[in-house]
Amino acid sequence: MSLLRSARFPAIVLLASAILALVLANSPLGPAIAEVKGAYVGIPGVFEMSVGHWVQDGLLAIFFFIVAVELQFELTNGELNSARKAMQPAIAAAGGVVVPIAVFLLFAGGSEAVDGWPIPTATDIAFALGVLAVFGKGLPSGIRIFLLALAILDDIVGIIFIAVLFTDDVNVGLLALAAVAVAIVGVLSRQLDRRNRLPIAIVLVLLSVTTWVLVYLSGVHATIAGVALGLAMAQRPALHVRHALEPWVNGVVLPLFAFSAAFVVIPSVSPSQLSPAFWGVLVALPVGKIIGISVAGWISLRVGNRGAAPHLSLLDLIAAGSLGGIGFTVSLLLSELAFADDPLVRDEATLGVLGGSMISIVLAAILVAQRARHHRRAAPTADDELPPPSRHEGQIA
């Protein structure tokens, strides 16, 4: 299990799952696997979803629960618990959202692909920290802290996009019942330190499943149920649950989602025939993120309190921006949601996410390694013995 809690291994598993999906989708086995992915599972006539949707709407809600627990911790006890701490990464994160959108719209504005503008705004922190762990030995802890805070803020933006942009025909009654269930989870979770833990834990699990069903049936994307539950739970038990779930999320949930989302047939067309969504995402992730994060981060150092965060040079910020361009998990989900009604454009946008993320991984490896060498030369003993941080640095992991 410790391997699945490390920074490096989950990123490798995630990438391998996506590559395997691409290979199989374009092999003779592709049609058979696609049939399995599209098969409906559940109670006939009552509650059914395709296998692909069980992965996207069901399993991924567990991932978003973990994200929400992380958000709760960082906003109350971590790197974002004050405006002073949050200012620099918040400004950089804003640049890392606005500029990729602008780059995407340069390619897709005015076309049918324009709805994909949220796709290149995400940062996959698991991948980013994996690259940082492999190539960043000797980097100051300030860069790691900055990247973690930046990615957390990116997660918040992604959650808002999912909740607001991809919700249709909301059933207010069912959503209100889900809110009541979440509130009860919040109250009961604060009783877990007392006796009778097992009955309370069982009730919490049942209420969590009920919340997910109610949110799904209400018309709001079901992953928001995981977010609400993660924010509502008392922090101590929530962190224990996250710790227990983390290996399963890293080893099962995210690889299955990566496989499902990346299972696309590469179109047999010339580059000029590819959708603007492909080119927009392909360029916006590596280029938009580097420009947005580095420029906005550099500005934040000059307009804010210099003591608000560890000093980062422009080259450090460019390296962090390259890591921010690894969109992957949330970008793949946004691609699925943005083009749910147009499978062809969705698949091309997915290829753009994979291509843009791979370009960012290569750029990040080069830039991070260069900055790590620079900092090791400048301070040979500083931070050299620090272990690579987990995604939840400062928490249980």
Image: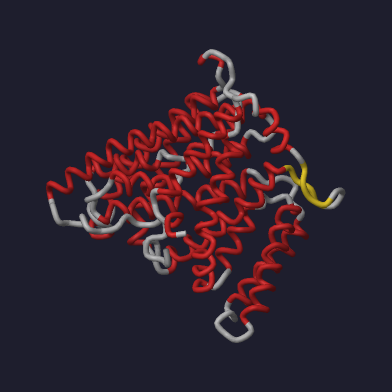
Q: Residue at x 43, y 59 (%)?
A: 2
Applied colour scheme: secondary structure
Q: Can residue 104 be seen in this view?
A: no
Q: Is residue 126 visible?
A: yes
Residue sitting nearer the eye, 193 or 69: 193
Q: Quadrant of the C terminus?
A: bottom left
Total labels: the figure holds: 0
Image location (x, y in percent) of residue 51: 70, 43
Q: In which quarter of the image is residue 207?
A: bottom right
- The answer to whether 168 appears left or right of 230 in the picture is right
Residue farthest right in this picture: 45
Figure check: 269 above or below 281: above
Image location (x, y in percent) of residue 374: 17, 43
- The answer to whether 113 appears left or right of 34 in the picture is left
Image location (x, y in percent) of residue 171: 77, 54
Q: Which residue is drawn at 13% across and 52% down?
A: 380
Figure check: 273 above or below 301: above
Q: In which quarter of the image is residue 78?
A: bottom left
Q: Which residue is drawn at 39% across and 31% down?
A: 359
Figure check: 272 above or below 97: above
Q: Which residue is drawn at 61% across and 29% down?
A: 25
Residue sitting nearer the eye, 233 or 180: 233
Q: In which quarter of the image is residue 6?
A: bottom left
Image location (x, y in percent) of residue 292: 37, 39
